[in-house]
Image (cartoon, coloured by chain):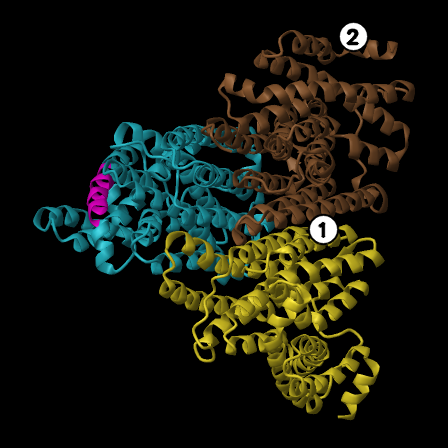
Chain colours: A yellow, B cyan, C brown
């Protein structure tokens, strides 16, 4: 506990933890003040995500390479998963899908691009491990194809046969989880020598002992779940109050909130010329959400949701995921980066964000 | 003749030749037993395709480099061509198109991916000739663009003006055949030093003398044509009996039957660490079907078919061909392979196969 | 003036200048002879474009690296800009968009492919600066995404809300201009050592002194503007007289006319084994039109046009631009070229040209 407090004192991001009790207080006292509750929830999730991320890495560091990698890969996007599960239980499938699509696009464009840009402003040219980046891009490409099929091929050939889309979504989810598992086997076991330098774990931050990490992991997960409930309940009306479309909120705001902690790590790595770390976090996170979080949500919707969720996204989201994947695949091809590569990638993201921001609010 | 019998004794695949007379007997005795006839026809085509493939290679081996390459390139997919011609004469254009699209997708995804996987399970990392793979991928890309245009650009801008689509299909077919011819000129003549190591011809299998090869070629082609007629006549009803959609049958079953012999060669090459051979067969076969077989079918439909055939595919098929080409182009970019690359490519194929299997049978 | 006359005597292309007075005479005497006027205008624009191009380069050569590059980058497609502005003022937005899309496709496919082919027919294998080609391809990719969004994502999700498309087009235009500016900063200033060998400026042609170049620049721009007016006014009816669709005229004819001078330089460079020059002109010109000319036209339409112009293209044009960009990105990946690479790229262009030529004239 003292360790935790010490951490909090040193890390200004964690001062935001004060908003966690504020959310719960607000919810009790002003249950109708949606905009206020939304803002408080956003501010509360950011430090919780940072704690969760550090706790996961600490446990992973202690359990050895393979098991640690597995744990990191499974819990690395725990914040996103918990937020999405809350939205799932509330039956807000549109929000779930927007946040999944948004996480893929934001991680593979904004997080990657900003890492290139921030690193490039300090270092003239940066090199990174092409093999690792290509594996992640390949996984991401596979997932995009899987998400594209129900929306494109199926939609073109059927007149909204929902049983078909449902069965297909379950089948695709199982395929993606298998691919994700085999990808870990490949990169952590059979060919790990190719993925050597992508060492996760904050540079300079030492891992917590298990006695701190495990309880923190459990407690913070519960807190994230509770705050997420407020977040999900208020997001719709807060968006209207801010004049933002729901698509923009799901795609951009929810995603940035969920990924804030990872972004901090990725950007710090880029500034320290450890671009392997940044590219690994950005693309690894994107492919994890596409191949693990999204399929798990589909499968869990049969247990937790009011109705089964499918993998059919609105056409615009599919187009954005496809373009994001293609952009990432094109830029990592050379294994080198300079500031303008970051600008190009961020620009693609800005095009999407601008489109969603301006989109008339009726749809999607 | 003795040579042929000897070959048959050594190659278990050829024992299936017993099903050739069985098909003809079945057709005479039980003309309404479509499912039985379908199964017999499938089992009969597999060994005939193997014989045809070996006969073609034997003739090619005897006629010297350039002429041999030309022959191999023209007759290499003779089985597919004969099956498609039979379907063409029967006016089953949907089946023709599905088998063309299916052959492109199956060769560039399943055959390529399984070669990578089978080779990778035995060898840690495999290298292959990038130049040859890139040429084939480039040709495949060109063909995909040509097949995409009538379905996408034309469809978006016209309201089903069939004369336009027809004229365009003939023009595109001529363009593709010219491109295919120039591609052979390039790889067999002007720049053949770049394509050196992709030596076709079974490793370990010696070519037949001309006196065996030529009559075999002629006789087996006739047999394939006769069996194909039974196959095409029974496929529709057999598919229904098995609960498969026509799209699945055309795309997956017909293609696997037609390419069985080539797959055997490609997989054997991969296991022997001769990945050049495998990649050459897989992508070469795909590009040959796209740039030679498909255009020839369009042109021949004016002579043989009940009506002209065009190059307009259903949107799902176009999307699959495009994704297959992009996948192949992305993975061959590095010129290296490991088992997981194969998994990725096969997974894309499985996504398509699953979609087609689950597709409600009304369409396409 | 004597310098100019001397230039004209040595360059047969400039003999076509005789058609400039012919256009004005024709317009006065035969204002209804649209086909004649169209042909005269085409013949007159070609030498004017060549003069304009040389004048711009002469000024650029005198003003030093950064300012010269800036000038070249801004005025390099002055002919296209002036023609498009004339069409804009006449409210012919369809023609403006077709010529923008056509310029992107023609430069990145026909000019690039023909350079590869012409160079490859003389030299066995040619190498060029990958870094420069990749930057241009990256910029082009960004612009294609920007042009794709209003047509695809927006169209899929709204029912023709024109305010939205309008606002989005202005926002995207500003983004593209910023990206273009930063790209120049990158290639001319912060990382210019990577883009070294792409030296513009005609090999063998010496720059004019400022006293010739500046007045020529001004006078020829005015002449191009005047001839363009005749051109734009006659193009529609001339197209019908020739039996060509408006899409074909805008995409192919207008573009080839505007880019004739640049093509002469690109092809000459390729023959002299200076493929850096050719690739730089082809892709640089395409990306300049996409990131600078098109956005400037959108912004100027608020001042000059009868109504604001947006960036929404017809779906076929978007598909062509996307395929052209992907083709360019794929072929420049290796940094090497042989004649068949040129054939492949030209074939993609021919597929488009053929489609547009055959397209029933009602649309677009």
Q: Name the residue under label 1.
A: A344
Instruction: Provide the major secondary structure of the magenta segment.
Output: helix
Read off the chain for label 2.
C
Is residue C352 visible to us here?
Answer: yes
Image quarter where the N terminus of chain C lies is top right
Q: Give the range drawn in magenta.
A: B222-234
User: Callout 1: helix, strand or loop?
Assistant: helix
Q: In which quarter of the image is residue A11?
A: bottom right
Mark 1: give few (<14), some (14-19) or many (20+) Cα within 10 Å. Answer: many
Q: Is mark 2 on a helix, strand or loop?
A: helix
- Residue drawn at (41%, 56%) of the image: A154
From the top left corner, tell me how far across and down residue B78 is, in percent: 33, 38
Please rate how many residues cluster around mark 2, counting C-alpha atoms within 10 Å: few if below 14, some from 14 to 19, many from 20.
Answer: few
Side of C97 where B54 appears, left or right: left
User: Can you say whether C194 is above or below C71 in the image?
Assistant: below
Q: Is residue B168 left or right of residue B127?
A: left
Q: Where is residue A363 in the image (x, y as percent from the top left)?
A: 54, 59
Q: Does the magenta stretch include residue B57?
A: no
In-front residue for pair C115/A47? A47
Q: Does the magenta stretch include residue B232?
A: yes
Q: Tell me how many marks there are.
A: 2
* Same chain shared by disc 1 and disc 2: no
In the rendered view, would you say A227 is above or below A291? below
- Mark 1 and mark 2 residues within 8 Å of each other at the beta carbon: no
Q: In this view, does C16 lie above or below C165?
A: above
Distance from Cα at disc 1 to Cα at disc 2:
46 Å
Residue A137 picture location, percent across and down: 60, 58
What numbered label is drawn on residue C9?
2
């Amino acid at each position: 506990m003292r360790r935790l407090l010490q951490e909090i004192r040193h890390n200004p991001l964690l001062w935001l933890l004060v908003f966690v009790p504020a959310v719960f207080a607000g919810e009790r006292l002003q249950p109708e003040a949606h905009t206020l509750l939304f803002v408080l929830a956003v501010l509360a999730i950011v430090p919780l995500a940072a704690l969760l991320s550090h706790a996961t890495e600490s446990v992973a560091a202690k359990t050895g390479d393979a098991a640690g990698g597995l744990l990191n890969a499974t819990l690395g996007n725990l914040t996103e998963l918990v937020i999405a599960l809350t939205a799932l239980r509330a039956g807000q499938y549109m929000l779930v899908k927007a946040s999944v699509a948004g996480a893929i696009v934001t991680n593979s464009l904004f997080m990657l691009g900003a890492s290139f840009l921030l690193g490039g402003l300090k270092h003239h040219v940066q090199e990174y491990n092409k093999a690792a980046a290509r594996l992640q891009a390949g996984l991401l490409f596979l997932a995009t194809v899987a998400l594209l099929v129900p929306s494109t091929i199926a939609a073109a050939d059927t007149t909204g046969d929902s049983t078909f889309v449902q069965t297909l979504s379950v089948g695709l989810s199982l395929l993606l989880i298998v691919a994700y598992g085999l990808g870990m086997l490949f990169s952590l076991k059979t060919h790990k020598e190719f993925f050597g330098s992508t060492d996760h774990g904050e540079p300079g931050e030492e891992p917590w002992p298990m006695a701190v990490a495990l309880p923190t992991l459990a407690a913070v997960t519960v807190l994230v779940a509770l705050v997420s409930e407020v977040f999900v309940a208020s997001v719709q009306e807060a968006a209207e109050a801010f004049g933002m479309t729901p698509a923009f909120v799901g795609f951009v705001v929810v995603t940035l909130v969920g990924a804030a902690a990872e972004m901090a790590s990725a950007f710090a790595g880029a500034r320290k010329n450890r671009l392997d770390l940044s590219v690994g976090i950005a693309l690894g996170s994107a492919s994890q959400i596409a191949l693990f979080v999204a399929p798990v949500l589909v499968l869990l919707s049969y247990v937790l949701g009011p109705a089964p969720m499918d993998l059919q996204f609105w056409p615009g989201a599919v187009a954005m995921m496809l373009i994001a994947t293609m952009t990432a695949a094109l830029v990592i091809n050379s294994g080198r980066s300079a500031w303008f590569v970051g600008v190009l990638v961020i620009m693609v993201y800005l095009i999407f964000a601008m489109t969603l921001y301006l989109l008339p609010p009726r749809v999607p």
